[in-house]
Image (cartoon, rainbow, N blue to C red):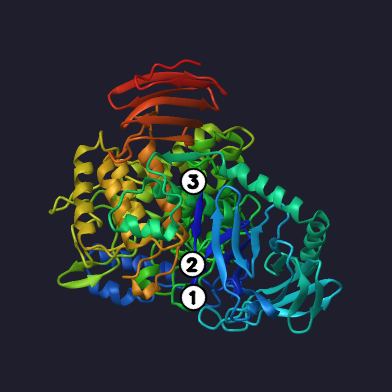
Amino acid sequence: MNDILWYKTPATNLHESLPVGNGRIGAMVFGGVYNEIIQIDESTFWSGSASENDDREGMQELSDQLRKLLLAGEYDEADRLGHHFIGNKGNYGTSLPIGHLHINLAGSLTQTNRIFSDYRRQLNFRSGLAITEFTLAGTLHTRETFVSNPAGIFVTRYYANGAVFDLEICLEGIENNVKITGFSGDNYTISGDAFEELHSDGKTGVHLTGSIRLKSDGLLKFNDRASVTAATYVEIYLDMATTMFTATPETECKARLNAAYAMGYETLKTQHIADHTSLYSRMEFHLEDEDLSYLTTDNRLKRLVDGSRDLGLISTLFNYGRYLLIASSREDSPLPTHMGGIWNDNIYARADCAQDMHIDMNLQMQYWLANPCNLSECSTPVFRWLRDIVVPKGRVTADKTYGANGFVAHVVSNAWGYTALGWSYNWGVWAFGGLWTATLLWEHYRYTQDEKFLKEDAFPILFEAARFASDYLFYDEKSGYAMSGPAYSPENHFIYDGKAYCLSVSNTCDILMIREIFNIVLQAAPLVDDQENPIDHDVLLKIQDQLIKLPPYRVGKNGQIQEWYSDFEEADSGHRHTSHLLGLYPFQQIIPERDLELAQAIHVTLQRRYADCELSSWTMAFFISYYARLLDGENAYEMLLNTFNRTVEPNLTSTMGKALEMWGNTWELDGNTGLTSAICEMLLQTIPAEDGDTDTLLLLPALPSAWDNGHVHGICAAGGFEVSMEWQDGQLTKVKLRANSARHIRVRYGENCCLLTTEAGGYYIGGPTLVFGN
């Protein structure tokens, strides 16, 4: 049972509660007996507003001045002026939690002599249902909770097996004015405002409105809360929306509730399960081990941390990442995920770091599992957000801040499409967050081979990102390279003459980002160029020339991959970011078996960085992925076990870690989705062709010895392949490929390799020697 989290006690905090969601509405279910709490979130509930004043005047001239100073090694003066190279925060805003839905038992069942027993709460990934059960006064009580994507609403049903009970229901805002405000017809109305004073002015934000509708065989009353007496069941239907994308949220909510109410609970539940399962069941990952499903999840986690083997819990963690992406990002979601997905622990909303879209790695990592885990449509909200919100604003920032064409977005963004420099120069001066996010479009094409998507949706954005990168570069006669900057290496500092600085030119992360977008556009251009929509070939010629003039990767004096153009020492040798290694993963600019010296330098870099690393959830996901790309399954697995030790909570959310107190142990979605995508890398990789040759599928490239028996079905590979594999005693026993296009592909397992020619829709079955038959 690798699809279930379950517990024998109610949750006492958010790290023990169970998340459900439909890509817009999120809920965290605590499972209380007498007093149930369900935290409610809605993805468009943001403080702040769109602004035309994010970009400051004079930044282009200051950028040119900083470049000259940095090239001359005048780091002190660059540091002094760099404090002015920032954007305006203004009413930037933050995603906010909405409130707590309280469902409290009332009447005789709350008496102290009523002892409950047989308690169980669980989350089923396959069905998307959170269920709480307990026996009270001799009667089994059950609560089922889900958030339906087809119906667009939150639903919970409380029923007792023939006995009657009383309930009180209210909604209390979390540090805001959201509450049940009245009764209209048969709807309890909800309203409130996304106001806060840390990231905005305290009076700017969206207005939320919504409704709660109850269905019961008991007597319903309303004063400042809803009450139900003498009921054997109560169904709660809840919907809400904000003014972010619609002028009529109340009308839309009521329409959805009316349709859902008419449909009825059982039909809604059946429809929800079918919809959710249709995505979740596309893939299966299982590691054979002793069946420990009789133990609660928190006990299994403790056993694993204490050193006991539990491969089933690893399978569960993998499946959890898939579940969380489905629950937080659907094809019709109005926004992509923020740092917490669609759930909000209110930590970042009350910290200097807003609950927003961080695009210096977090947003990207949240979506890396979408393609390999057969969930490509879950990335659609990112693409829509880029096209409609970020790119238009990013064009303005590119022109105003750098005098460049194309679009740019820096380190952080939000629902309003903030693209300016960050408002603090020691973290906000990095011009490639938008470009990095745009590479998700290319990955979508690589996996789906959807040429219409590439031509109409992806390439226009990718081309604009490349145009910006091209204009951002400048030629340095002294070095003979096309250089970038001023920028930092996210979010690290270096030592020069005994002082720590952040700004430099041509840090490794800058250059690998530019190299990546140039290569993408040059690969994609022949596939989309036609007479009706011709590409500007002058731009293509320019980036071809610039590509060969970019600085190469460099190995430093300690045998490490240099993080900066010069061989500086890190100010923080254990920094959580490893942005200079992105050419290994998620990109594939460094192929270990081809680039032996760089691969060895990456090994050294990982050892040095990990020795004193400020471990976070996503840092560990990176380490696992790096070792997987290095084909080092044993170290990848050791990193995975250390992740359980350091960052995984009782509800299996992978948090920033208790050691990083500045973030209050907050949960970031990328901690979980990043772990799932990292495990994918251990199971299957696609090595891109070199010099026009054929791509290579690597089967089980980093399988650790502990994973001796198992299978994976429905995992996807770039090039349009769906793969299933089985293995025993650490050896591949069966592989099945399904191709969605006609092509040649090399398939490799260990020393065995073959060239396979596929047809669209064809199935190919083979064994460990890779002799395939249809």
Disc 1 marks a residue whose amino acid type is: Asn
CA gap between label 3 and label 1 equals 50 Å
Residue identifier under label 2: 420
Q: CA distance from mark 1 to mark 2?
A: 8 Å
Q: Earlier in the sequence, mark 3 or mark 1?
A: 3
Q: Amino acid at mark 2?
A: Ala
**Where residue 161 appears, x then y in whole percent?**
70, 61
Residue 725 coordinates in the image, percent (x, y): 43, 30
Which of the marked residues, 3 or 2, is nearer the chain's N terminus? Answer: 3
Q: Residues within 10 Å of mark 2 (few under 14, many from 20)?
A: many
Q: Could you say where residue 144 lies in the image, as x and y percent from the top left?
A: 65, 59
Q: Is mark 1 in CB contact (under 8 Å) with mark 2? A: yes
Q: Amino acid at mark 3?
A: Met
- Seen at 66% across and 79% down, the residue is 178
Camera sees residue 284: yes
Distance (Cα) linking label 3 and label 2: 47 Å
Instruction: Quadrant for residue 303, please give it.
Output: bottom left
> Quick check: 237 left or right of 646?
right
Can residue 693 be seen in this snapshot? no
